[in-house]
Image (cartoon, helix red, strand yellow):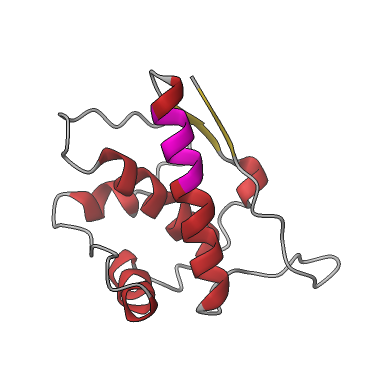
Amino acid sequence: MTIKYSALEIAKKISAIDPAFRVPTAEQIPIIESLHLGPTVVIAGAGSGKTETMSARVLWLVANGIVSPSEILGLTFTRKAAGELASRIRKRLRQLRTIGLLPKDPDTKSEIDIAVSVST
């Protein structure tokens, strides 16, 4: 597995087009860049950046060609949180496309579908 982009490289490129985008903290980067590819749990207090960390992890995985958006399943405890996570991931994947880091479909060479599954 070859890692092309770090979480910081992706964040810097996105923050160039979206000044509101927050660069991951030193605590968030190991979660975002973890090579553990099985189910992963992120537990942290309110307002600590869980949703942003989870969406940044999806960006990192997709930008590096490790997974496609269709292989992502996000789970949260409330419908409101699920809606926010799904919205944030879709927004970030659109930004990934804008900065040219969204991989093409290997078979068709067309843009990949950015739909993700997020539920409670």
Residue at 16%, 40% (x, y): give it: 48
- The x and y percentages for residue 56 are 37, 54
Task: Give the camera-side residue of 118 and 109.
Answer: 118
- The x and y percentages for residue 34 are 34, 48
- The x and y percentages for residue 103 are 63, 69
Q: Could one spot residue 64 in this view of the protein?
A: no
Going by the image, does 103 lie left or right of 31? right
Vertical order, 70 against 73 (above or below): below
Magenta residues, as a range? 81-87
Q: How many marks?
A: 0
Going by the image, does 114 lie left or right of 15? right
Task: Give the camera-side residue of 4 and 57.
Answer: 57
Residue at 39%, 32% (x, y): give it: 40
Q: Is residue 90 magenta?
A: no
Q: Could one spot residue 22 in this view of the protein?
A: yes
Residue at 18%, 30% (x, y): give it: 44
Task: Give the camera-side residue of 59 and 46.
Answer: 46
Magenta region, main secondary structure? helix
Vertical order, 66 against 118 (above or below): below
Residue at 54%, 52% (x, y): give it: 90
Where residue 111 sits, quadrant-wise, is bottom right
